[in-house]
Image (cartoon, grey):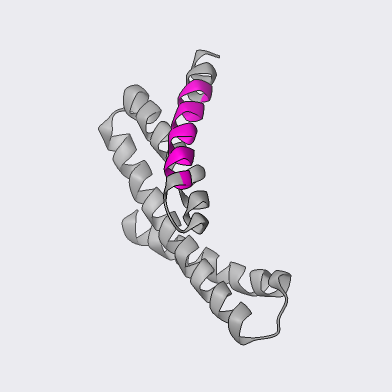
Amino acid sequence: MNDSIVRFFLGGAVVSVFALIGDVVRPKSFAGLFGAAPSVALVSLALATSRHGSEYVSALTTSMFAGAAALFTFSFISCQLLKRTNLSAISVTLFVFPVWLMVAFALYAMVG
């Protein structure tokens, strides 16, 4: 229970700080980048460091980078398909989702 309370308050504080950064940064489309993912990742890593040590956090960080690269690939391909074809967003998502899975699992296999 204590871990949940710490996560709640630390997560809220870090999300608030990143939301302020997102509000200041131009263009406003970057606000979403600063709103959730970095703050959740930082809080998770801080709590994991205090509980499990640096080796565990190193593996966790590597997995986060692999996931970010897979998401970037998914986003890039999706944007290109949406701009260049008349496919709907759901069609593109369903089409590119297997690519995201392949990239994510390939990177996971490479980094262990």
Q: Residue furthest left?
A: 54
Q: Quadrant of residue 80?
A: bottom right
Left or right of 66 in this view: 78: right
Q: Who is closer to the viewer here, 4 or 36?
A: 36
Residue shown at the point (42%, 42%) measured from the top left = 21
Q: How many marks?
A: 0
Q: Residue furthest top?
A: 2
Identify whether 102 is placed above or below 48: below
Residue shown at the point (26%, 33%) measured from the top left = 54
Residue shown at the point (33%, 36%) measured from the top left = 56
Q: Residue 64 appears at what percent x and percent y?
A: 40, 49
Magenta span: chief secondary structure? helix
- Is 10 contained in the magenta span? yes
Q: Who is closer to the viewer here, 33 or 19?
A: 19
Q: Residue 23 appears at what percent x and percent y?
A: 48, 45
Q: Residue 98 appears at what percent x and percent y?
A: 59, 69
Magenta region, residue range: 8-23
Quadrant assignment for the N terminus: top right
Q: Quadrant of residue 69?
A: bottom left
Q: Quadrant of residue 109?
A: bottom left
Q: Who is closer to the viewer here, 74 or 104?
A: 74
Left or right of 98 in this view: 46: left
Identify whether 88 is placed above or below 84: above
- Is 30 contained in the magenta span? no
Residue shown at the point (32%, 56%) measured from the top left = 111
Q: Residue 76 appears at what percent x and percent y?
A: 49, 72
